[in-house]
Image (tube, rainbow, N blue to C red):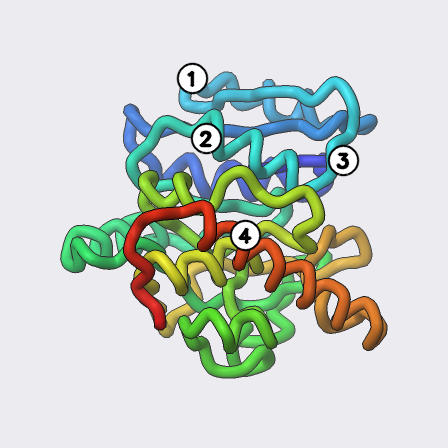
Amino acid sequence: MAVYNGQEYLEEQLQSILKQLQPADEVVIVNDASVDRTISVINKFQDSRINLLENKINLGVVKTFEKSLNSASGDIIFLSDQDDIWLAGKVQKILAVFQAHPDVTLVLSDAQIIDEKGKITADSFFEIRGEFVANPISNWIKSKHHGCTLAFRREMLEFFLPFPDDTPMHDIWIGIVNGIYGKAFYINEPLIQHRRHTSNTGRGIFNHAGISQMIKWRLILAKNVISLILKNKKLINYI
């Protein structure tokens, strides 16, 4: 989890996560130089499973998530936003997919959309975004990897990291790269409530930018993917 000025919703989110975890699990949180009560909210839990790291200066959401991933020790890594709510059974259902399908490297689910007060405004993120597809070319055109719903096997960090400095968002990069080197499994059921409010960071980045910026970002993604493929000697799953 990357957090920045998350005091308003962070407590509810952490409660929804921690009650689903086992004693040996961890929640890696990187605070990106927040100036509100974010740290106080986290410390209030006094839970040994929370591993809190702090950026001395604000690095932005992509590099902060990169730091959290580099600090994670688990075999299965879940991404989390600071202001959502994990629905009961999320962790169990995702882990069951990984156990049943050893070839699957990334699992994601649908999500409900809620507003600032927690009211459901949409029952399905993917009804709005469009049907999920794993094809990397399709995701290069329109990303279908909703970062706050993602979980993946630790070995995929070899391909995901480091995030290119100019990548527009980490989940877009993860989705495209997993489509090349891994295999995705989509759970057609909302396992989180994703909160939409005026302070959201990054979500919808491709939808609200101008045409020239959208083209620029896609060219950057193409350049970085080509660079990754040229540097990597492992077999590519997608041709």
Pointer 3 and pointer 4: residues touching (CB < 8 Å)? no
User: Which residue is tagged 2?
Assistant: 27
Secondary structure type for disc 3: loop
Question: Nearer the observer, disc 2 or disc 4?
Answer: 4
Looking at the rendered image, the disc whose residue lies closer to the viewer, 3 or 4, is 4
What crowding class fits label 1: few (fewer than 14 Cα within 10 Å), some (14-19), or many (20 or more)?
Answer: few
- Which residue type does callout 4 highlight? Ser
Which residue lies at the image location 76% right of the left edge and 70% below the top edge?
Answer: 214
Helix, strand or loop at label 1? It is loop
- In the rendered view, does 121 fall on the left or right side of 72? right
Question: Residue flagged by tag 2: what amino acid is it?
Answer: Val
Q: CA distance from mark 1 to mark 4?
A: 40 Å
Q: Give the labeled residue for mark 1.
A: 48
Q: Which residue is mark 3?
A: 5
Q: Is residue 176 above or below residue 208?
A: above
The answer to the question of whether label 2 and label 4 lie on touching residues, with beta carbons closer than 8 A, is: no
Residue 214's place in the image compared with 33, above or below, is below
Q: CA distance from mark 1 to mark 3?
A: 22 Å
Q: Residue at x 45, y 54 (%)?
A: 229
Tell me if residue 133 comes above or below residue 66 in the rendering. Answer: below
Report the Cα–Cα distance between label 3 and label 4.
Answer: 35 Å
Q: Nearer the viewer, residue 88 or 69?
A: 69
> Closer to the camera: disc 1 or disc 4?
4
The mark that comes first in sequence, 1 or 2, is 2
